[in-house]
Image: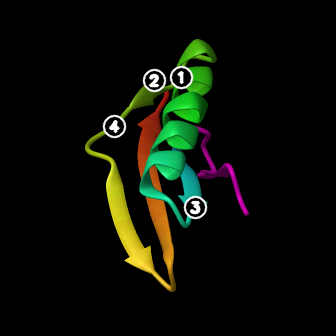
Amino acid sequence: MNMEEDHIDGDGKYMLVRSESPALASAANKLTTWVGLKMKEGWSPHGSMQMQYQGGKYYLVQPMIRE
């Protein structure tokens, strides 16, 4: 189970923080934790969190930006 997966663009200004879990509450808690940690590193949420349910798992993604 992936708790977090960062995808940073080439110039290091945009990132996607993801979590996945069969339980929505677990996926949300993980995403909240990872977003909080990234905010301490200078990243800010950019737009709304996105959710997808597929194959028995919830996938949550939060775009983030660093200026």
Q: CA distance from mark 1 to mark 2?
A: 17 Å
Q: CA distance from mark 2 to mark 4?
A: 11 Å
Q: CA distance from mark 3 to mark 2?
A: 30 Å
How crowded pointer 1 is (Cα within 10 Å; few <14, some 14-19, many 20+) is rated as: some
Which labelled disc corresponds to residue 36?
1
Amino acid at pointer 1: Gly
Q: Residue at x 50, y 59 (%)?
A: 23
Mark 3 lies on a secondary structure that is strand
Q: Is residue 51 magenta?
A: no
Label 3–label 1 contact, CB within 8 A = no
**Quarter of image, res 11:** top right
Camera-near label (4 vs 3) is 3
Camera-near label (1 vs 2) is 1
How crowded pointer 2 is (Cα within 10 Å; few <14, some 14-19, many 20+) is rated as: few
Which span is picked out in magenta? Answer: 1-12
The residue wearing badge 4 is: 46
Mark 1 lies on a secondary structure that is helix
Q: How is the image coloured?
A: rainbow
The residue wearing badge 2 is: 67
